[in-house]
Image (tube, helix red, strand yellow):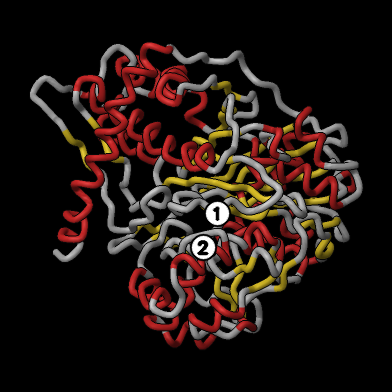
Amino acid sequence: MLIAHDLGTSGNKATLVDDDGAMLASVTVSYGADWGSDGKAEQNPNDWWDALCQATRDLIAKANVDADDIDAVGFSGQMMGVVPLDGEGDPVRPAIIWADTRSTKQCDRLLSQVSMEDAYRITGHRLNPTYSLTKVMWMRDNEPDNFNRMEKFCLAKDYVAYKLTGVIATDPSDASSTNAYDQAAKGWSEEIIGAADLDLSLFPDIVESTEVIGEVTREAAEATGLRPGTKVVIGGGDGPMAALGAGVIDAASGAYACLGSSSWVSVASDEPLLDPKMRSMTFNHVIPGKFVPTATMQAGGASVSWAMEVLGEDRGYDAVLGDAAEVEAALKGLFFLPYLIGERSPYWNPLARGVFAGLHMEHKQPHMVRAVLEGVTFNLLTGLEAFTDAGMKIDHIDAIGGLAKSSLMMRLMADIWGLPVAARNIVDEANAIGAAVVAGVGAGIFDDFAISKTLSKRSEDTVPNSERTEAYKRPYELFLNAYERIEPWFDDIAKL
């Protein structure tokens, strides 16, 4: 058997998988985050470790299995962060996670040394303060004592893998989320790291996602309940891992949408996709030699969670979304720009903010909730357009993540995108399934990655209504136009 850990923003989900790929049990242990002012987003790395230890012990007990029967452990983890470690491997400060946007000045300075076009060509990504590189620069500029104590940084899943094994390493998928990885050279970019005026020694060694980096130490075994000597496979970042869990292993696999706190649309390819408008980015896949062109928005599911908290009146998702299904928003002139924590695709603007536009006295809570759902769906459409503009043929979408449970969201995606959409029955488990597959391949339990295609099923397609697809075209144009008109205002309010 295998244990896959999915280290997300809100908690760690541990899943037990057998050698046929079947999920036997799962346990989730939650932890918090520090969402401060000025774009601050931090977590305590030891909260991740404590959650992993508790989840592992609880999982073994829940499934009533013997630790000797667990052959390997693997990971999926939140990307684009910084866990700064001292010479003893201890964090010198809380981790700066993916949503943190405080390094805007550092990003601007880096752009004075490296053009956006060159950076995009080298890394597959725009230079942006949501990535790891400028967060390290921010530490240097704002916390010199902490920076000087740091000897190495890593990402979320790398830290817990280190705690299990004593080995610090990362993989190409997570490395490609740092803004410092050269996808053609298959290693850290000396050009970009040099332009950032950082030492290459701060960056961890890179191994394949399937690499067995070590074994569970005796100390870690006592903390987790695992057997000393259990194999530990490094795994990969949650975006590419979700693609694998959704069965997206090559260009023929189609596209998928992940509807979690951060939401995205993605495909698999044999080479990076370099969009002339730089709307999308390309991660390395957890499958060696493959890539995952992706268009990610900062607050997809998070916008819906915010709407539920602020507008939901504690009535529950089903009741609130049921009411929203009975009204119209964009088709009646009400829009929501879902940029509550800045935005990545397509605008790459950390200063962007959420906006309701077109509010009228007639609009009530259901109209506003529907506008939020439509705003998320409109925004993800810009990513699909980046793929089709590059010549990729997309004829259907598979959906995973919490929002894929919503029949209203599935209907909106089908109608607004004009494509059949189907939820996979592993709505919440794609990352864990992907991590289990990578761990199984790395440990020699699975022959190849194709097993991921057999581990989940697609629901019946939600087929687009052609009349509504046509009707949504003009509101989509107005949605895009609203951002263009309001964008200068975001700069102004940032100066308050």
Residue that appears at 17% across and 22% down: 364
For residue 398, which quarter of the picture? top right
Q: Is residue 73 left or right of residue 426?
A: right
Q: Is residue 56 left or right of residue 443?
A: left
Residue 4 seen anywhere in this rendered image of the structure:
yes
Residue 279 higher or lower than 458, as above or below: below
For residue 214, which quarter of the picture? bottom right
Relative depth, front residue between 5 and 276: 276
Dot 1, how many residues are within 10 Å of its Cα: few (below 14), some (14-19), or many (20+)?
many
Q: How many discs mark residues in the rendered view?
A: 2
Dot 2, how many residues are within 10 Å of its Cα: few (below 14), some (14-19), or many (20+)?
many
Marks 2 and 1 sit apart, C-alpha to C-alpha, by 8 Å
SS for callout 1: loop
Q: Is residue 92 left or right of residue 176?
A: left
For residue 130, which quarter of the picture? bottom left
Expressed as whole percent of the image width and height from the top left, the position of residue 488 reads: 19, 56
Tell me the residue that label 1 is attached to.
274
The type of residue carrying mark 2 is Tyr
Mark 2 or mark 1, earlier in chain: 2
CB within 8 Å, label 2 to label 1: yes
Relative depth, front residue between 381 and 56: 381
Residue 321 higher or lower than 296, as above or below: above
Tell me the residue that label 2 is attached to.
120
Residue that appears at 43% across and 35% down: 381
The type of residue carrying mark 1 is Leu
Residue that appears at 75% across and 49% down: 287
Residue 93 higher or lower than 398, as above or below: below
Expressed as whole percent of the image width and height from the top left, the position of residue 493 reads: 16, 58
Expressed as whole percent of the image width and height from the top left, the position of residue 413 reads: 45, 25
